[in-house]
Amino acid sequence: MPRPQSRTQILSIIGFVSAAVALLFFPIVFGPVAVALGIIGHVRGERLGKWAAVAGAAAMLIGMALGALLRATMSA
């Protein structure tokens, strides 16, 4: 049985914004928030929900790698 599609994509949009913040500032906090919002949006029928979750996971990993690289560069 197909899920009813949501008219608004609000959870997915907030998930994408959280993913962008995770990329630059607090990946360990905002990455999982983006993933959770994306999954919840997907379950509620938002078309972009799954992509917000993927973007959140990717942004979290890239943000953590950038933070580690920056930390290593500054300590050298």
Image (tube, rainbow, N blue to C red):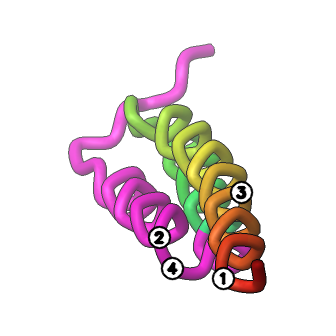
Q: Position of residue 31 (x, y in %)?
A: 64, 64
What residue is at 55 percent from the left and 17 percent from the top? 2
Disc 3 designates what residue? Answer: 65
Q: Main secondary structure of the magenta part?
A: helix
Cβ atoms at labels 2 and 4 below 8 Å apart: yes
- In this rendering, which labeled residue sits more in front, label 1 or label 4? 1
Q: Which mark is residue 48?
A: none
What type is the residue that disc 1 sits on? Met
Give the CA distance from mark 3 to mark 4: 12 Å
Secondary element under disc 2, as helix, strand or loop, is helix
* Quarter of the image with the C terminus in it: bottom right
Q: Which residue occupies the foreground of this view, 24 or 57?
A: 24
Quadrant position of residue 33: bottom right
Disc 4 designates what residue? Answer: 25
- In this rendering, which labeled residue sits more in front, label 2 or label 1? 1
Looking at marks 2 and 3 on the same chain, the residue that comes earlier in the sequence is marked by: 2
Looking at marks 3 and 4 on the same chain, the residue that comes earlier in the sequence is marked by: 4
What type is the residue that disc 2 sits on? Leu
What type is the residue that disc 4 sits on? Phe
Secondary element under disc 4, as helix, strand or loop, is loop
What residue is at 62 percent from the left and 43 percent from the top? 58
